[in-house]
Image (tube, rainbow, N blue to C red):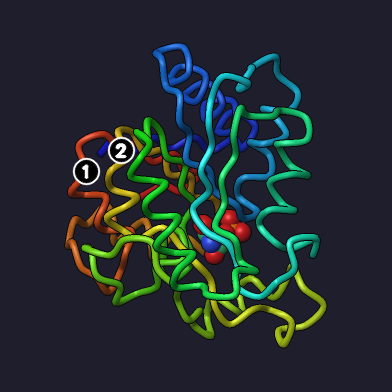
Amino acid sequence: MQLETVKDLDQLYTRAFQLIEEQKDNGAKTFGLATGGTMLPLYERIRNSSIDFSNCESVNLDEYVGLPKEHPESYLSFMTQQLFKEKPFKNSHLPNGEATNPEEEAKRYEELLQSLTLDFQLLGVGENGHIGFNEPGTSFDSETHVVDLTPSTRTANARFFESIDEVPEKAITMGIKSIMRAKYILLIAVGEKKRDAIKSLIDGNVTEEVPVTVLNNHSNVIVLTDLDF
Ligand SMILES: N[C@@H]1[C@@H](O)[C@H](O)[C@@H](COP(=O)(O)O)O[C@@H]1O
């Protein structure tokens, strides 16, 4: 794992953009994308650049279950607004959170992922160390599945909704194993709230209790953060 601390956020996102561009120039065709506040300045950078993804595919990590696609906080809406509208990919895939049978949908999404080669995966991290929506305790062998969101994750994400009651209770997420198949992973962690999660990652004690620590088992990970350790 390569850790890069960049104090200045403007420089941090410039570096993140540069790493994505480098991957694309090196032939990456399938990009795993992430949502969350951390990604907003990065997507803005991409929107304002001349990078062209029209020959690439994207797959997103996760989607809320039961939130209408057109809800502004669905991850499909987030991605459309922040990226796809201005920077379309040849195909963009997200789990369908409105599927009548979410378990079947998770299976379909996993099969789709396995039919692609995930060249690159962008990751944020939850305050409790979750990646995608793989909450603490998720098996490292997990593939795409339906999850019950923890109270701490629902509380953290409540800032995007009118009230916590509106935050969905379930989501479909790529599993830890699905994420670990990516050839190259870029994790971005900004702000003190992410300190405990990144500290656990750096300490190297790999445990399912802190999902992000699994990245110690991957040979091609870069962690970009504004935190000093
Ligand atoms: N499912 C997403 C994660 O993929 C993301 O990493 C996390 C952190 O979000 P933020 O960047 O807003 O802190 O939020 C959500 O739970």
Q: Quadrant of the N terminus?
A: top left
The reply to whether residue 106 is visible in this rendering is yes
Q: Amino acid at mark 1?
A: His
Residue shown at 46%/59% (left/top)?
Answer: 132
Residue shown at 33%/38% (left/top)?
Answer: 3
Q: Amino acid at mark 2?
A: Val
The reply to whether residue 192 is visible in this rendering is no
Q: Is residue 74 above or below residue 1?
A: below
For disc 2, the neighbor class at 10 Å (few under 14, some 14 to 19, many from 20) is some
Could you tell me how far apart the alpha carbons at marks 2 and 1 are, in whole angstroms?
7 Å
Label placed on residue 221: 2
Q: Is residue 165 above or below residue 94?
A: below
Residue 61, given in percent of the width and then of the height, sits at 49, 53
Residue 77, given in percent of the width and then of the height, sits at 74, 53
Label placed on residue 218: 1
Secondary structure under the numbered disc 1 in the rendered image: loop
Closer to us: 153 or 127: 153
Picture quadrant of residue 169: bottom right
Do the numbered discs 2 and 1 sit on residues whose CB atoms are within 8 Å? yes
Is the residue marked 1 within 8 Å of ligand 1, measured from its CB?
no
Closer to us: 108 or 173: 108
Secondary structure under the numbered disc 2 in the rendered image: strand
Residue 89, given in percent of the width and then of the height, sits at 63, 29
Residue shown at 29%/77% (left/top)?
Answer: 137
Side (left or right) of 224 relative to 214? right
State ligand 1's quadrant.
bottom right
Q: Is residue 72 above or below residue 59?
A: below
Picture quadrant of residue 128: bottom left
